[in-house]
Image: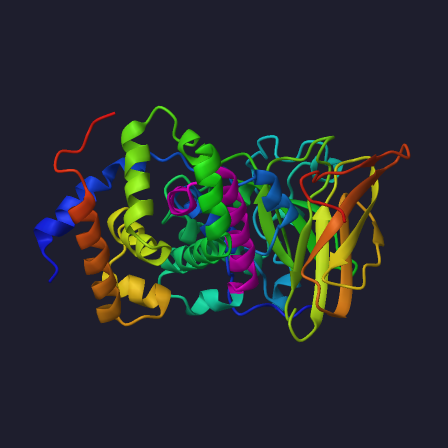
Amino acid sequence: MIGYSDDAKVTELLAPLRRIESVPFAERTWRRLRRPILVASIVATALALTGVAIADGFGAFNGISAAQNTQTGTNVLPPGLLAEIEQSNALLAKYPGAAQQLPDTARVLGTMPDGSKVYGLSDTRGDLCTISEAGGSCGPPLSNSQPITFGGANDAPTTGGTFIASGVAIDGVTSVSFTPVPGDGQEVTVPVKDNVWVYKEPDSHASNAHCIIAHMADGSTVNPFPEVPCP
Amino acid sequence: MPEAPAAPPAVEVLFRAHAQELGRYLVAMVRDRSLAEDLLQDTFHDALRAQEQLPEVANERAWLYGIARNRALRSLRRGRRLQRALVRLAGSRQATHEGDEALVALLDLLDRELSPELRAFVLLRYVHGFQAVELAELTGLSPEAVRQRLVRGRARLLAAAPAEPKEA
């Protein structure tokens, strides 16, 4: 029989366990494993250029010249993406300490090959959030040691879907190479255009990648995610 | 154009919100900080892989804990024999909470008295606040089966616990 007093005794007995120090969850892994937290519908590519945003990016856009512009109507998020962010923020609000994304800081960072735009915005933590039709995620602002973001997604990895890898790069990054996983082990190299890079692979089982390398204009390379093994 | 998923899964968001407490849970389960860190990463990977379930999930926190629990139990089953040997040899797990003797004694008690499965139930119920019904959903067992396990785990703990807990 379950007795309330026994319940209380066990709760009291186990109370010291609340002192256990948690283990870190590597923030960098978030960047490596960037996955869509916001996915816009296809119709979201139709921009509604309404209003003029006035907030600042809080340093989230450091090194991204495509974002260093005065906010105009073209930077305003389309309604579909804005709705997704509001939905995400509402979800985040349930968790104390979770950052809220700031739509008023949005800037157009670049354009995907299909013409859809990639937006950058800051959150209340000062992180850089990137959002496009393919999805979005947040992570610390970029730097010379971590000059790119990397996000991978596949709508049907089990049966074979479209693997989309994309990200943002700081100035000076000319291309990004990586090996999709799971896959045939072939490395792919994707050029960076206007601080944005994107790769699409149809009929793919891949949903992530390893051996991710940023290639710089001076010929050097940067391994932005040294914790990711490259077999 | 890629087909948009039906709803924003927000696995990253959920995980970020719960990573701290999941980490504590995993440390308590496996008593090895390095292993717990690996398991936390594995839990995140599993959650990503299963993110299509999320729109159907009523209790997102319980969903994440369920994944973490499975990871921990799998790891403990695989490494039980090796772990025992390591504990005997080095006592390295105690070093995880050096200086907190009460905590170490409590972890020893849990280790000694409860199987990993029972330990998972007891921790989830009495430390992380899940109700029996939630644990039933989380594990796929019936609420009655969960209650029986909780009763068993609790009885073993109370029988083995010192009458007056020693302070560190």
The picture places residue A3, in percent across and down from the top left corner, at 9, 56
- Quarter of the image where one finds residue A169: top right
The picture places residue A54, in percent across and down from the top left corner, at 56, 37
- Quarter of the image where one finds residue A61: top right
Q: Is residue A211 above or below residue B8?
A: above
Our reading of the magenta stretch's main secondary structure is helix
Q: Which residues are magenta?
A: B24-51
- Quarter of the image where one finds residue B160: top left
The picture places residue A2, in percent across and down from the top left corner, at 12, 59
- A86 vs B38, nearest the viewer: B38
- For image coordinates 42% across by 70% down, the residue present is B56
- For image coordinates 27% across by 53% down, the residue present is B122
Left or right placement of residue A81 versus residue B154 in this view: right
Q: Is residue B69 above or below residue A202?
A: above
- For image coordinates 46% across by 64% down, the residue present is B54
- A203 vs B132, nearest the viewer: B132
Q: Check the picture and name the quadrant holding the N terminus of chain B.
A: bottom right
The picture places residue A161, in percent across and down from the top left corner, at 69, 71
- For image coordinates 61% across by 44% down, the residue present is A29
Residue B139: in magenta span: no
**Furthest-right residue in view?**
A219
Q: Check the picture and name the quadrant holding the C terminus of chain B.
A: top left
Residue A205 visible (yes or no): yes
